[in-house]
Image (cartoon, rainbow, N blue to C red):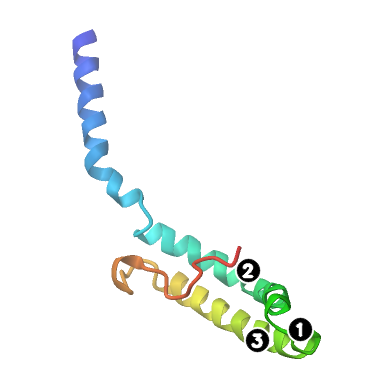
Amino acid sequence: MERKVKIMFLVFSFSLLFFSQNCLAGDPIRKLGRGIANTTLGWLEIPAEFFREADRSSELGIFIVAPLKGFFKAIGRTLVGIYEVATFIIPIPSHYRPPIEPEFIL
């Protein structure tokens, strides 16, 4: 009995080596999670753009350019998130690469 348990444990352990590749970044579950995160948190591009623009330009750019850029980036990230949720099972783009960089807003 004890020997059978050891053999089953070894077989199970070696089988994990072959199936563990699906747990990496290029899988549909990661694409689904990325899509949900980008759909729900896409609006965070607006305050994030304030910080990015503060490092790049003057005060005028912070109050005029940052909200507009953040708004359009938020719309883009939200739409990409919806697309990824709708097509999470299809490996497009190849190997489930993120269509937008950075992959997540945070």
97 left or right of 18? right
Callout 1: helix, strand or loop? helix
Query: Which residue is disc 3 drawn over?
Result: 69
For marks 1 and 2, give the CA distance.
21 Å
**Residue 97, position in %: x, y?**
37, 68
Q: Amino acid at mark 2?
A: Leu
Callout 2: helix, strand or loop? helix
Callout 3: helix, strand or loop? helix
Q: Amino acid at mark 1?
A: Ile
For marks 3 and 2, give the CA distance.
16 Å
Asked whether residue 1 appears in the rendered view, the answer is no
**Residue 23, position in %: x, y?**
35, 49
Q: Residue at x 61, y 73 (%)?
A: 42
- Image mark for residue 41: 2
**Residue 11, position in %: x, y?**
20, 28
| Dot placed on the residue nearer the N-terminal end, 3 or 2 | 2
**Mark 2 surroundings: few (<14), some (14-19) or many (≥20) residues within 10 A:** some
**Residue 63, position in %: x, y?**
79, 86
In the picture, which quadrant includes the C terminus? bottom right
Q: Amino acid at mark 3?
A: Lys
**Mark 1 surroundings: few (<14), some (14-19) or many (≥20) residues within 10 A:** some
Q: Residue at x 76, y 85 (%)?
A: 58
- Callout count: 3
- Image mark for residue 62: 1
**Quarter where residue 91 is shown:** bottom left
